[in-house]
Image: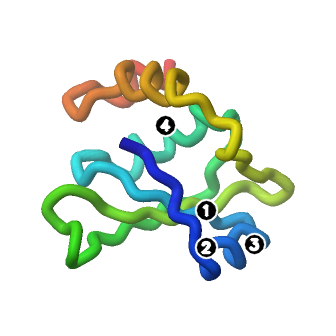
């Protein structure tokens, strides 16, 4: 599941258009980009992933950078919307078929 990381460092990075999340390790960078763009209706400039030693078997942390002038508001995000987008994208789904 998609979970935002809220720390002092992540809040400082938000000022530069960078947002940090944790997600299941099964998702690739293109899939993460697709999910963020569909859920938040923004354009993602880049995705960087990192496996955390503590959670290495279950999740990974990723940092997204948005196109200049855009921001995320995940405080009002409904879990139903996230579930719907996640259900449309499984790890076996061809990403090209979803983007069309």
Q: CA distance from mark 3 to mark 1?
A: 9 Å
Q: In the image, 3: left or right of 91?
A: right
Name, please, the residue furthest toward the right. Answer: 69
User: In x, y percent, where is residue 42?
Assistant: 70, 41
User: In x, y percent, where is residue 57?
Assistant: 13, 62
Identified at 63% across, 56% down, the residue is: 45
Residue 84, numbered circle: none
Task: Find numbered disc 2 in the image and state the secondary structure of the residue it sits on.
Answer: helix
Name, please, the residue furthest toward the left. Answer: 57
Q: Quarter of the image containing the N terminus?
A: top left
Residue 10, numbered circle: 2
- Mark 3 closeness class: few <14, some 14–19, many ≥20 residues within 10 Å: few
Q: CA distance from mark 3 to mark 4?
A: 21 Å
Q: In the image, 13: left or right of 92?
A: right
Q: In the image, 95: left or right of 26?
A: right
Residue 19, numbered circle: 1
Which is more N-terminal, label 1 or label 4?
A: 1
Which is more N-terminal, label 2 or label 3?
A: 2
Q: Nearer the viewer, mark 2 or mark 4?
A: 2
- Mark 4 closeness class: few <14, some 14–19, many ≥20 residues within 10 Å: some
Query: Quick check: marks 3 and 4 in contact, CB under 8 Å?
Result: no
Which is more N-terminal, label 4 or label 3?
A: 3
Q: CA distance from mark 1 to mark 2?
A: 7 Å
Pointer 4: what residue?
Answer: 35
Which is more N-terminal, label 4 or label 2?
A: 2
Task: Find numbered disc 1 in the image and state the secondary structure of the residue it sits on.
Answer: strand
Which is more N-terminal, label 2 or label 1?
A: 2
């Amino acid at each position: 599941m998609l979970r935002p990381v809220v720390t002092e460092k992540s809040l400082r990075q938000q000022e530069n258009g960078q947002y940090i999340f944790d997600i299941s390790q099964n998702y690739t960078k293109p899939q993460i980009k697709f999910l963020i763009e569909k859920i938040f209706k923004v354009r993602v400039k880049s995705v960087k992933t990192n496996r955390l030693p503590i959670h290495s078997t279950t999740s990974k942390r990723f940092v997204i950078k948005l196109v200049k002038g855009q921001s995320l508001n995940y405080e009002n995000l409904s879990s139903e919307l996230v579930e719907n987008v996640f259900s449309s994208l499984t790890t076996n789904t061809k990403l090209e078929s979803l983007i069309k």
